[in-house]
Image (cartoon, coloured by chain):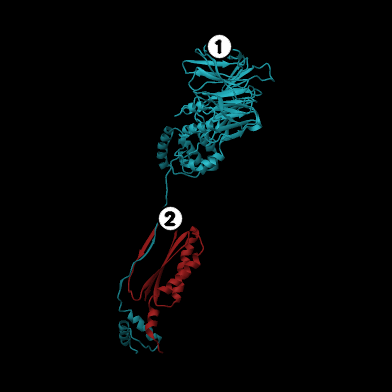
Amino acid sequence: MNLHCKWILYTLTAFDADDVFGIIKESVEGTMGGNIFQQNRVDQWTSNVVELCLSQLSKLGKPFKYIVTCIIMQRNGAGLQTASSCFWDDTTDGSCTFKWENESMHCIVTVFGLAI
Amino acid sequence: MGDRSGLQAASQLFWKQGCTMMFKDVADFCICVSMTRRGLRLGMAKVTQVDFPPKEMVSYSKETQTPTDTQTHTQARPEEEEDEEELAEAKPAEDSQEKKADQEEKQEEAPPKELTEEEKMHLLHSDEFLTFFDRGSRIVERALSERVDVCFDYSGRDLEDKEGEMQAGAKMSLNRTFSDERWSKNRVVTCLDWSPQYPELLVASYNNNEDVPHEPDGVALVWNMKYKKTTPEYTFHCQHPVYCVNVVGTQNAHNLISISTDGKMCSWSLDMLSQPQDCLELVFKQSKAVAVTSMAFPLGDVNNFVVGSEDGSVYTACRHGSKAGISDVFEGHHGPVTGLSCHSAGGPVDFSHLFISASFDWTVKLWTTKSTRPLYSFEDSCDYVYDVMWSPTHPALFACVDGSGRLDLWNLNNDTEVPSASVVVDGSTALNRVRWSHSGREIATGDSDGQVLVYDVGEPICVPKPDEWSRLVHTLMEINENRDEGDELAAQRLVA
């Protein structure tokens, strides 16, 4: 079996931020697109987003451990600041943050992928 | 490749140099991959940040005044009640300050809660609330019916632009109508006068009511412009019809002058009204008694005066001195003279030699005491002109009323052919009297049906501009030139 590895290795083993970004975007928009912030439905949405992301990410088949966080905040005029950083192997590990909003809420989903 | 060490070496090579690798199978590949992991180099990643700035909320705090027994419900009051309480803030401040102090203490103890329907109804019907609401709504009602124009531009800039519009629109507008069912109905208004002391008071005299012979023949009513009530302030009766009165002189040395149709002029002292102080027979050229129908005194003059008579002539006369009695005759009218007015608007130029007369011959004539022929004749009316009066403030403005119910304002500086403003009263009843108020802003007219109507005159018309006096000098010169050129002496006297 002949494999041209350089590119394949890289793509197969490194964290692909664009791919992950697309996955998160689909999950979020599918779950919350067109909805208004409703206190009784928000927890449902957060878990839905996280589950969808994870299932899609695991389907990628890459040797990664994933951590997905989802924050939904109601737009009431309050401010929100978050920050995160990691201590990892820059070459193989990566993270992707997706910010989404509509008139009634903000949503921030972060995926950390740590190569096994 | 097969052995692990070989794979490991190869993977390191690969990662360092990025060279092409060939694997036997996928398993080898995966092992290679996993081995590369052993050479872990860990480092800090960049910080990922998310920042949503807070929204700027503009807020203000307002205090509401509530009675002490309903403090716990302060913040939970429904919208309408809060508005009403804000009205109540117009109340004396002392109350609110005490209550606020109490409120602040108690608010800390009892957090506000939503009122139930019964509690709201109870509050709405409580005595304290009702008194507050009653007082507050009355004050606001007064303020709301105030017709003050808060956007008025005193600098006059607005007026210059709008002068055209305003002249078209609001020249004269009916302000009030005074009529009393009992005393003024069916009586002709014979005389009107404004009080110099209280500008809102107006006295009107009436002659007899033919339908009710047992009622007094003469009635005088004092009307008040300030309040909206429709009844007169004071009512006076007398046995004889009142025609005309005039008070001349200063506050201390004054006389009441009355003239009747038998040619007798009497002056009365107000202290003793049973007998005149002195009488003067007005006879012209020692033979003809003058049947006086109207009289006027020039501004500031208590001795010389002018009278109009039934035969259409106007006479000047003196009360005292060697020349007491009739002096000159001014002929020009073709019918009885109904009204006379001497120029009274004081200003930089003295026009007190001017007077105007109204007559049954449908005209108003402008005269000067310096000439026995009229200066000008205003012939716009189609009915008997019953009364005429100069404006007390505007030197070139006078008003006249006629039998067709028309009230005309003439401005000599504007146009001498047609009136500058004209209005016909409702019902076209003949207007018998016209009187400017002392401010020169309102005109009172009396009609033959006992009604007194007060008109507001638009500002551009009745308020004189500073150049009106000099313009009037030119207007008079023009009028004079247009007159028969033969009277050179009179023209010279006018200009001087």
Q: Which chain is depicted red?
A: A
Q: Secondary structure at mark 1?
A: strand
Q: Image check: B218 left or right of B249?
A: right
Q: CA distance from mark 1 to mark 2?
A: 93 Å
**Disc assigned to residue B279:** 1
Residue A101, located in which quarter of the rendered image? bottom left
Give the labeled residue for mark 2.
Answer: A77
**Residue B67 x, y percent position in the rendering:** 46, 36
In the rendered image of this protein, does residue A45 appear above or below residue B358?
Answer: below
Q: Chain of mark 1?
A: B
The residue sitting at the right extreme is B211
**Residue B183 x, y percent position in the rendering:** 63, 21
In the rendered image of this protein, does residue B398 appear above or below residue B120?
Answer: above
In the rendered image of this protein, does residue B286 appear above or below residue B87?
Answer: above
Q: Chain of mark 2?
A: A
In this view of the protein, which residue sits in the foreground, B144 or B126? B144
Local crowd at mark 1 within 10 Å, few (<14), some, or many (≥20)? Answer: some
**Residue B493 x, y percent position in the rendering:** 48, 26
In this view of the protein, which residue sits in the foreground, A93 or B354? B354
| Colour of chain B in the image | cyan
